[in-house]
Amino acid sequence: MLTPDQWVLDEREGLLPLAKWQKTVDVMARVFNAPAGFIVQYASEGFQVVISSDQESNPYEAGIIIPADTNLFCKKVVEQQGTLYVADARGDRYWETNPEVSEDGFRSYLGLPVKWPTGEPFGTICVMDFNTTDYQKDYVDLVGELRDLIEADLAILSQYQVISNLAMTDELTKLYNRRGFYAVAQQRLTLARRSNLSLGLLYMDMNGLKDINDTHGHSAGDVALKRLGDVLAGEVRENDTAARLSGDEFVMLVAANSTEQLDHVQQRLVDSMAAQELSVSIGAVLIDDGSASLAYWIEEADKRMYQNKRA
């Protein structure tokens, strides 16, 4: 899920209408008769040009990143979260250290802040000119309208991601549900196959859930399931994936190069669950055959889990 500290140009699903943004910036530059127009994103790493107007006079290409401590027009906009119009930067000593002025020769800047739907700064939309300008209010309002279009697109992206996350997440435990696990695990298997890496699969069934439900009610059973989900979430490492497949059945895909490593992960889970007064039956398999499907490995782990449960 895209976050405010990730570059939108790294978003691989094609959810942002970057082609539309490009047309918007190109039209803006033509209307202003300006040599350069931009959409710039701010993150902890600095400022990245997301969209750059398609003109030979424009010195900045999309994708370049400028360090966060650089004295930029866009930095000022992000800091003050308001419109910035500089008609002639040469008349203000504040901009003497701005490389856009001292090195690239820009004199005029008009920029407005762009925000994420959460209200956090996304960056700016701006036009820049090598000459002194005298933009009237209508020009500022025009950039404001274009900014609103960009923010509307970001809101749509955010809503899509929320809906997509809900469709792939178990409501009770906040782990992946079956659909989410299959989608993520299949990607992990493909990557492991290409990289000649091994993975381990743990299939888990909570012991005693029926007794809890019968004795204390389903709300108590839900509390137990939630606690089990919390344990798994706490044990998940960067390259692991945990999910609740259904009812009291959980699964975890982990990085493991040997049966010994997989056994270690399994024992760690058992110990963590015991500390929460939880008991599970676990079936573990080392995925060492890249040609077999994910469904095959889940079935194998499920069989071993039931063997352990009967034992």
Image (tube, helix red, strand yellow):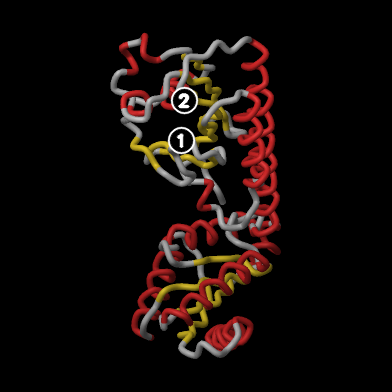
Disc count in the image?
2
Residue 108 in picture, x, y percent from top left:
47, 19
Amino acid carrying label 2: it is: Val
Helix or strand or loop: what does disc 2 sit on? Answer: helix
Amino acid carrying label 1: it is: Tyr
Q: Quadrant of residue 91?
A: top left
How far apart marks 1 and 2 lie (CA) works out to 8 Å
Q: Which of the marked residues, 1 or 2, is nearer the chain's N terminus?
A: 1
Residue 301 in picture, x, y percent from top left:
55, 84
Q: Give the left or right position of residue 42, taking residue 225 as reference.
A: left
Going 40% across and 15% down the picture, which residue do you hit? 89
Q: Report which residue position mark 2 lands on.
A: 78
Is residue 311 something that shows in the picture? Answer: no
Q: Nearer the viewer, residue 40 or 31?
A: 31
- Which disc, if any, is residue 42? 1
Pointers 1 and 2 in contact (C-beta within 8 Å)? yes
Going 67% across and 13% down the picture, which residue do you hit? 138
Q: Relative to 74, is 93 above or below?
A: above
